[in-house]
Image: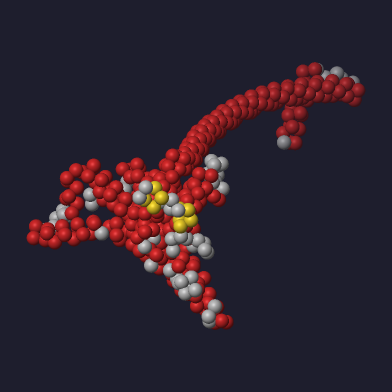
Amino acid sequence: MAESHSPMEQFEIKTWIPIQIGDFNASFTNSSAFMILAVFAATALMVFAVRPRAGVPGRWQLLAELCYQFIAKMVSDNIGKEGRPYFPFIFTIFVFVLFGNFIGMLPYSFTFTSHIAVTLTMALVIFVLVTVIAFIKHGFHFFSFFLPAGVPIVLSPLMIAIEVISYFTRPLSLSIRLFANMMAGHTLLKVVGGFVVPLGIFGVVPVAGLVAVTGLEFLIAFLQAYIFTILTCIYINDAINLH
Amino acid sequence: MPQFDVTTFLPQIIWLVISYLVLYFLMAKVALPRIGGILEERQARIDDNLDAAQSLRNESNAEAEAYEGSMAEAREQARSTIYDATQEMSADSARRHEELGERLSGELKSAEQRIAEAKLEAVTGIQDAAASVAAQATERLIGIKPGEEAVARAISDAFNTSVKESG
């Protein structure tokens, strides 16, 4: 009973279909189901809504075009022309995180972006990719990234230490920002929701709060997807242009 | 916190990779080229229409200029035609005026001459008639037929005196 009312219960990973491949547990869980749902929803918008290929777009096609132009502009503003090959990669990150966040806003659904395993995996892949791009583009010259030009020699050990630490904490900050935001918002909703029934007639106060916080959560759902994507752009830009 | 249950990490990561890759291929191979194509096509159509509008505008500007030019030319031509016509007409009327004046003065002169002749004739006729009447009257009164020359002289003198008296 206490277990089922815990605000953390909504983050529970429940195995739907146990799958075991060798030593690996690849079970199909509620998290997997909502990832697949996000893929379907994103595909429905991005592929099927633009099927008419209308010169004057309808609502859904316009929405898909807006997403495309939003990310295309983000890539060209932050990386420039060289960012073009990474556009599908960045776009997929945005759409995947955005749909994960938004689908998580539905009651009784599951938010896969509220799990550190998911966000950290994405952040690590981005981190490794960015580092590989930097090495391919610049070779060992890449290490000059850790010592910005014009820094006095005396300060260089300190600067290098700071730059190295900030570089290697990137995946952590990137993943924890998204996971913590999504988890905190959903927990807050659940905690405030728990006050409604015990307060009786005064339950309208937390309900009003819930309405406001739900609106805020939709904003955060978009904003976190945006931040995650734009930071990816900035990291790729750093790799290509080295400051 | 369920987030730190390490046993759930592997299935999450595996399904994350699967669904991300599926979405990536759907986006990279289908959705993005399609949307990009639509946007490009629309941009191309807008550019085409703008070009067409621009060329039509240039054309109409040229037409308007040509129209203005031909209007100005026609106006100039009309003005010169009117000037020529006015000039011609005034020259013509001056010529005719002169002709008419000449003719009139000629006619006046001939009329004056005719009047003078008629007057002279009349005066002469009157004198002759007066002479013959005076001669006959004298013959009846006194029975003497005066000489023709004397009568004529007397009539002429009397006539001249009467003309002088009557002014």
Number of dots carrying numbers: 0
- Residue at (83%, 24%) from the top-left corner? B130
Q: Pick whichever, A10 or A67, lies toward us.
A: A10
Q: Quadrant of residue A119?
A: bottom left
Q: Is residue A14 above or below residue A22?
A: below
Color style of the picture: secondary structure
Against B126, is A18 above or below?
A: below
What residue sits 29% from the left and 60% below the top? A172
Of A20 and A218, nearer the camera is A20
Q: In the rendered image, is residue A98 in sight?
A: no
Q: Is residue A117 left or right of residue A9?
A: left
Q: Residue at x 80, y 17 (%)?
A: B148
Give coordinates of residue A17: x percent, y percent. Answer: 47, 53
Q: Residue furthest left?
A: A154
Residue closer to the observer: A76 or A227: A227
Residue A35 is situated, as x and y percent measured from the top left of the image, at 45, 53
What residue is rendered at 44% in x and 46% in y?
B23
Q: Is residue A23 left or right of residue A98?
A: left
Q: Is residue A168 left or right of residue A4?
A: left
Q: Residue A230 location, x and y as percent?
A: 35, 54
Residue B40 horizontal side relative to residue A136, left or right: right
- Quadrant in the rendering for residue B118: top right
Q: Quadrant of residue A219?
A: bottom left
Task: Tell me where residue A223 appears, x and y as whole percent.
Answer: 41, 60
Can residue A60 be seen by looking at this rendering? yes
Task: Judge by depth and name the residue closer to the eye, A242 or A97.
Answer: A97
Compared with B87, A183 (above or below) is below
